[in-house]
Amino acid sequence: MEKQIMTITDCTLRQKNGLPDLSFREKLELCRLIDRLNVDLIEMEEIRQVKIDSLLIKSVCTAVSSSRIAVPVALNEESVRIAREALKNAVRPRLQVPAPVSSVQMEYLSHMKPKAMIAAVADTIRKCREFTEDVEFIAEDATRSDTAFLRSIITEAVSAGARTITLCDTAGAMLPDETAAFINSLYQDIECLSGVTVGFSCTDQMNMADACAVSAVRSGIREIKAASFRTNAISLMNIVRILDIKANQFDVHCRIGTEQIRNLTSKIEMLCRTGLSRSVAAETGADDHDSGVMLSTHDSRESVMKAVDKLGYDLTADDMEKVWQCFSEIAEKKDLISLRELDAIVATEAMQVPPVYHDIQYVINTGNTINAMAHMKLMYHDRVIEGMAVGDGSIAAAFNSIEKATGRHFELEDFQIQAITEGREAVGETIVKLRHEGKLYSGRGISTDIVGAGILAYMNALNKIVYEEEEA
């Protein structure tokens, strides 16, 4: 008899407690690593900041090759529309309809009565089905729900078109035998469950999540939500190893191999705990720009566009044309062009704008016994602005003083320094990348003063952001 397939969904990004505050780039790299585990689905966070979150989902859909992408929606048509747009290029996307089903959480979180909740869930599922057949209803806090109500809302969800029904022990208060009894009772009482995939999710409040997941599998559950970096969820590594060892006894198998799981989950943990830069360095032994990828005059426009995408940029057609023209000119004179050099081309050519901030003057004091301090004075249009700040080094102090003067803070995605001439009076080049509302902006600065080059690069990137805002 052929073993049944166990679907594994990675819920690392959906964990509500304990997950580090990851940057856009770190979340994208996290999804790439999870994809290499061969999980069936990667759960994304609910779209709250539309521009940023939608761009992340679109980027993940492009970056992953094995896993499908699942996005939760709120109980309204606009949320479904936004999620559909973010997932439009995904292969076999899933829309999730999570809803609290215990009386306490229904009233507190959704301010709905039972009848209104059933209607809202069914209506949202029907709207999701207009986009994809893969719709999941997530019954949050199901183990504390009224028995009759839970059966009613599950029946309506299946009738509306949900292909997967996930039961959640949100409180994490059930023991393994209680979990089994709960699931068995639903299978007995809800006839339509036999025609859909039933999933299980559990928090690790009593350090029993993995044991409850095993009981759920033995009771007929065929989808498990687990986390590759666990803070309060089922452990993906543990549940996969158990399923592998007990495959014959449970009569199930999953796509995730056990050979690389320890290595990959270690890298995921490193990324989550220490940030992207050290994780990538540990994996590749080099930074992104020294990864061995080289371009030449023989590369097509499409190849260069893919390389620009790899660097994280989202360029307009006009800016991409400028980058391509500059690349072509350099490629005729130079055999190979590295990603670092392509980065400099983008910073130089893409989105060149009139400077909103200009006439920069600065003083920086530093030493080996005091923190560096920077005083920045510049013009914003026709108005003088200034700011003072300290930092861990001259560059950090300079960037902090710019933030003080402008009253703006942006995520510093990357900062690169390299010498472009030799000798004591060597000219230094810097590239600064700032991320704003999910989009990457880069600036380039050249000077014999490396701090000055950094300031010029930062202001170049900042001017692009502000110009685009003011033109919108």
Image: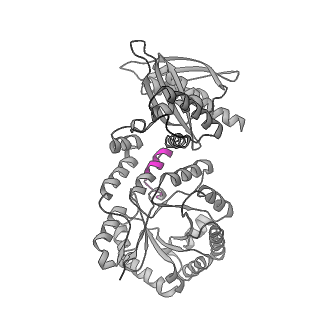
Give residue 365's quadrant in the image.
top left
Please state which of residues 62 and 9 is positioned toward the viewer in this rendering.
62
x, y percent for residue 315: 60, 40
Taking the spot 42% from the left edge, 39% from the top edge, the residue there is: 293
Assign the C terminus to one quadrant of the image.
Answer: top right
- Residue 388 appears in view: no
Foreground of the two, 79 or 61: 61
What is the number of callouts on the image? 0
Q: Quadrant of the N terminus?
A: bottom left
Q: Is residue 235 left or right of residue 188?
A: left
Q: Could you tell me residue 274's position as x and y percent?
A: 38, 44
Determine whether, in the image, residue 183 is placed left or right of residue 348.
left
Q: Position of residue 128 (x, y in %)?
A: 62, 67
Q: Is residue 292 above or below residue 254?
A: above
Name the quadrant containing residue 77.
bottom right
Its colouring scheme is one colour
467 in relation to 146, above or below: above
* Residue 221 x %, y %: 42, 76
- For the magenta stretch, what is the residue range? 15-30
Res. 378 visible in picture = yes
Residue at x 48% of width, y 44% of height: 25
Would residue 344 be found to the left or right of residue 282 on screen?
right
Q: State the image quarter where residue 120 is shown.
A: bottom right
Which residue occupies the extreme top position in the image?
Answer: 424
Q: Nearer the viewer, residue 107 or 242?
A: 242
On whether residue 352 falls in the magenta region, the answer is no
